[in-house]
Image (tube, rainbow, N blue to C red):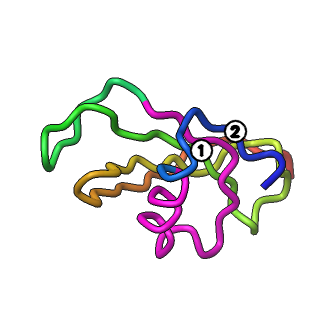
């Protein structure tokens, strides 16, 4: 957790980690930033955007997944970031 960067309150970090727990079994979350975006499900401001690295990635310095989560309603969405890696 020492390299986990965030702008959340301690309670919000706990809620975020519980919300995305089923998505992040094989991911290492590097950062989580709460922005001014609107949740597509509940319409509230303050959706969280985070970047994660797959534990199966060949290098731990490239973000491989992006996770969007709402701390209020529990909405979550994960997308894969297309990166070019050396063989």
Tag 1 residue: 51
What's drawn in magenta, residue-wise?
13-34
Q: Residues within 10 Å of mark 2 (few under 14, many from 20)?
A: few
Which residue is outermost to the left?
42
Residue 22 drawn at (x, y percent): 47, 75
Decide if residue 61 is on the left or right side of residue 33. Answer: right
Element at badge 1? strand
In this rendered view, identify the residue nearer to me: 62 or 8: 8
Q: Which residue appears at 33% of the width and 24% of the height?
A: 36
Return the disc, 2 or 1, that comes first in the chain's sequence.
2
Q: Which residue appears at 60% of the width and 75% of the height?
A: 25
Residue 35 drawn at (x, y percent): 41, 27
Q: Which residue appears at 35% of the width and 55% of the height?
A: 77
Residue 53 drawn at (x, y percent): 69, 54
Label 2 with label 1: CB-CB less than 8 Å: no
Q: Which mark is residue 20?
A: none
Q: Any magenta on residue 50?
A: no
Q: Quadrant of residue 48 in the image?
A: top left
Q: Residues within 10 Å of mark 1 (few under 14, many from 20)?
A: many
Element at badge 2? strand
Q: Which mark is residue 5?
A: 2
């Amino acid at each position: 957790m020492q390299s986990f960067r965030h702008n959340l309150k301690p309670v919000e970090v706990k809620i975020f980690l519980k919300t995305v727990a089923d998505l992040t079994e094989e991911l290492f979350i590097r950062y989580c930033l709460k922005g001014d975006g609107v949740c597509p499900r509940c319409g509230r401001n303050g959706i969280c955007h985070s970047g994660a690295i797959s534990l199966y990635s060949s290098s731990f310095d490239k973000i491989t997944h992006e996770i969007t989560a709402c701390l209020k309603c529990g909405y979550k969405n994960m997308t894969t970031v297309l990166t070019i890696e050396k063989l």
